[in-house]
Image: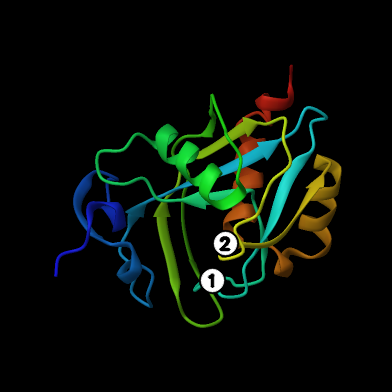
Amino acid sequence: MPAEPADLVVLLDEDGSPCGTAPRATVHTSDTPLHLAFSCYVFDDADRLLLTRRAVTKRTWPGVWTNSFCGHPRPGEETTEAIRRYGLHELGLTVADPVSLVPSFRYRAVDAGGIVENEVCPVYAVRVDAEPVLNAEEAAESRWVELSELHAAVAAAPWALSPWLLEQVAAIEAAGGWPVIDR
């Protein structure tokens, strides 16, 4: 039976151009094809960042602290719409006006179980004025942190953080910082 369109991710060629689709449930393996994703960092009105700890049932990097949420745009779906969809699904947050921080971020990482992440993963930030309501299948817990706390965690315990968060923090700062909090 063919996969429903909602369960498909966009496959990419080495240049980052769409070249097909695959069922989301089959993409993350030991030989993960390059595909489209996104990462989003959620800030509150006090300029604190929401970190989440991935559910221990997640296929990749279970129980690891990471950015607020990540996901995969569906074929034909704008990334900003996917961000809104995932924000509501994973964190119970209505998000608007995503700000692009690193539009061309790309990474490949292998977790301890041999599962590969291989994504073109534009990085965004949003601001909210509500508390998250976590979907337990996605996030085990969350915590609002100051950027100084994030930097301290990156320096002291990088092993406790997702590899994409580590690379994204460096890329965001190399691109000029966190404009979403520079009001």
Name the colour scheme: rainbow
Q: Which mark is residue 144?
A: none
Q: Residue at x 46, y 42 (%)?
A: 85
Disc 1 residue crowd, few under 14, some 14–19, many 20+, Cα 10 Å: few
Q: Are marks 1 and 2 in contact (CB under 8 Å)?
A: yes
Residue 153 in the image: x percent, y percent? Answer: 81, 57
Q: Which mark is residue 58?
A: 1
Q: Quadrant of residue 116?
A: bottom left
Residue 33 in the image: x percent, y percent? Answer: 30, 64
**Three-letter amino acid code at disc 1?**
Lys
Q: How many labels, in total? A: 2
**Three-letter amino acid code at disc 2?**
Glu
Q: Is residue 114 above or below residue 90?
A: below
Q: Secondary structure at mark 1?
A: loop
* Separation of marks 1 and 2 at Cα, in angstroms: 7 Å
Residue at the spot of label 2:
138
Q: Is residue 35 above or below residue 101?
A: below
Give the side of residue 14 with respect to residue 61, left or right. Answer: left
- Mark closest to the chain's N terminus, 1 or 2: 1
Q: Quadrant of residue 50?
A: top right
Q: Quadrant of the C terminus?
A: top right
Q: Nearer the viewer, residue 54 or 169?
A: 54
Q: Residue at x 40, y 55 (%)?
A: 119
Give the side of residue 145 with respect to residue 101, left or right. Answer: right
Q: Nearer the viewer, residue 26 or 7?
A: 7
Q: Residue at x 59, y 58 (%)?
A: 135
Q: Residue at x 24, y 43 (%)?
A: 17
In this rendering, does residue 122 appear at all? no
Q: Is residue 82 above or below residue 95?
A: below
